[in-house]
């Protein structure tokens, strides 16, 4: 299958390209400002996706069977600082991609976020009404509606959550951000009363590709890991997994004790029915996700000194990730 992946230089997009290649698909990988460097991708291009004319020309030229949209302005702060771009990239771009997908008869898979909910109740079902607290969630919720409206039976939206995995530079994953504090000698303050349901990056990428391969699955779906955990529990289990002293590196805290918390949803746990029952890709428990994590690039020496364990260093080549 010929698949166009947008946002292929991003944390998730890169992994989606790798998953597609592993499963024998032909991939056109699009970066926004950087060229995706991924061995095996049939084409890698830089394209500003807000250039509607160039985007249309590319898709009409390539006529892909699937488009996976991983391009986004994917942070709360980034959207607040640049509301116009947030609307363009998180709302209007998905709409145009869905229109073009419908036109060329391609499946469109679009990633959305648990941040479309306000976090008051948790255990959200895929049929629950979005209730976003900030612009990021609002623009992502608008993007979902546009994709489903214009992509129709060709469209699947995956609402997902905190990504747990390894990034090429060792700076994006859940554990990688903790290592940054720990190696700097800072224990991390983590809330015991804020709940998320982290998902494995590779597992989520596999879900996107399986959805391309299963044309009968369309609509809004939730995908995450099996376990809803407090941020504190995640930190403790990550430290323990790496043989680090959790009592030294993780400090329990309450949301009420953080004066500058801003607006943050409290409980974004998701119910994974009905997608979990339909896919061959399994839902992964947090313990299984931990098994995939590496000591982040750049922290090997610190880690070896701290634990006495030896780290196997990987080659710096795209396909190794
Ligand atoms: N990260 C998470 O924990 C998380 C949690 C829940 C949901 N999600 C969702 O998952 C998806 C991917 O998130 P991510 O964390 O992988 O994002 P990311 O790492 O920030 O990547 C964003 C990608 O979008 C591209 N992009 C942005 N503006 C563009 C433009 N105008 N033209 C072309 N490309 C553009 C960027 O390209 P360049 O960098 O080359 O400019 C980059 O490849 C998003 O839909 C996000 O809402 C993420």
Image (cartoon, rainbow, N blue to C red):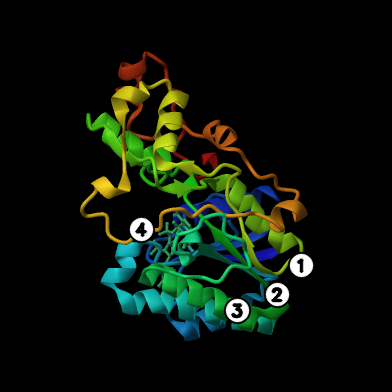
Q: Write the residue at 32% across / 76% down.
A: 83
| Contact, mark 1 vs mark 2 (Cβ under 8 Å) | yes
**Ligand 1 under 8 Å from disc 1 Cβ:** no
Q: Between marks 3 and 4, how big is the CA–CA gap?
A: 30 Å
| Contact, mark 4 vs mark 2 (Cβ under 8 Å) | no
Q: Between marks 1 and 2, how big is the CA–CA gap?
A: 7 Å
**What residue is shown with label 2?**
154
Q: Nearer the viewer, residue 85 or 22?
A: 85
**What residue is shown with label 3?**
98
- Nearer-N-terminus badge (1/2): 2
Q: Is residue 52 above or below residue 182?
A: below
Where is residue 270 drawn, in percent x and y? Answer: 57, 54
148 displayed left or right of 76: right
Q: Nearer the viewer, residue 292 or 42?
A: 292
**What residue is shown with label 1?**
215
Q: Between marks 3 and 1, how big is the CA–CA gap?
A: 15 Å
- Nearer-N-terminus badge (2/3): 3
Where is residue 30 drawn, in percent x and y? Answer: 50, 65
Q: Is residue 84 above or below residue 245?
A: below
37 displayed left or right of 248: right
Q: Secondary structure at mark 2?
A: helix
Residue 41, by quadrant, is bottom right
Looking at the rendering, the quadrant in which ligand 1 lies is bottom left
**What residue is shown with label 4?**
264
Q: Secondary structure at mark 3?
A: helix
Q: Nearer the viewer, residue 145 or 69?
A: 145
| Contact, mark 2 vs mark 3 (Cβ under 8 Å) | yes
Q: Tell me the crowding category of disc 1: few under 14, some 14 to 19, or many 20 or more residues within 10 angstroms, Cα based.
A: some
Q: Tell me the crowding category of disc 2: few under 14, some 14 to 19, or many 20 or more residues within 10 angstroms, Cα based.
A: many
Quadrant placement of the N terminus = bottom right
- The answer to whether residue 162 shows anywhere in this view is yes
Q: Between marks 4 and 2, how big is the CA–CA gap?
A: 33 Å
């Amino acid at each position: 299958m010929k698949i166009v992946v947008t946002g292929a230089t991003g944390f998730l997009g890169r992994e989606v390209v790798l998953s597609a290649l592993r499963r024998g698909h032909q991939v056109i990988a699009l970066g926004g400002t950087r060229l995706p460097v991924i061995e095996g991708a049939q084409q890698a291009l830089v394209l500003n996706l807000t250039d509607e004319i160039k985007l249309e020309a590319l898709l009409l030229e390539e006529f892909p069977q699937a488009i996976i949209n991983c391009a986004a302005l994917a942070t709360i702060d980034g959207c607040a600082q640049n509301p116009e771009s947030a609307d363009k990239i998180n709302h209007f771009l998905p709409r145009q991609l869905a229109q073009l997908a419908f036109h060329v008869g391609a499946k469109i898979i679009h990633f959305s976020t648990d941040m479309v909910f306000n976090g008051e109740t948790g255990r959200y079902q895929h049929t629950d009404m979005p209730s976003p607290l900030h612009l990021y969630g609002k623009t992502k919720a608008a993007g979902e509606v546009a994709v489903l409206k214009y992509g129709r039976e060709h469209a699947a939206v995956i609402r997902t959550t905190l990504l747990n995995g390894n990034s090429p530079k060792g700076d994006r994953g859940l554990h990688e951000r903790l290592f940054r504090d720990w190696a700097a000698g800072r224990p991390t303050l983590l809330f015991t009363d804020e709940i998320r349901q982290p998902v494995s990056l590779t597992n989520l990428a596999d879900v996107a590709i399986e959805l391309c391969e299963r044309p009968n699955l369309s609509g809004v779906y939730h995908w995450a890991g099996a376990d809803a955990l407090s941020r504190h529990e995640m930190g403790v289990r990550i430290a323990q997994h790496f043989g680090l002293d959790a009592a030294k590196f993780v400090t329990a805290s309450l949301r009420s004790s953080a004066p500058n918390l801003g607006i943050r949803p409290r409980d974004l746990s998701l119910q994974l029915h009905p997608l979990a029952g339909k896919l061959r890709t399994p839902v992964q428990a947090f313990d299984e996700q931990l098994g995939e994590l590496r000591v982040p690039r750049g922290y090997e020496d610190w880690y070896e000194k701290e634990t006495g364990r030896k780290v196997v260093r990987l080659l710096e080549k795209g396909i190794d990730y």
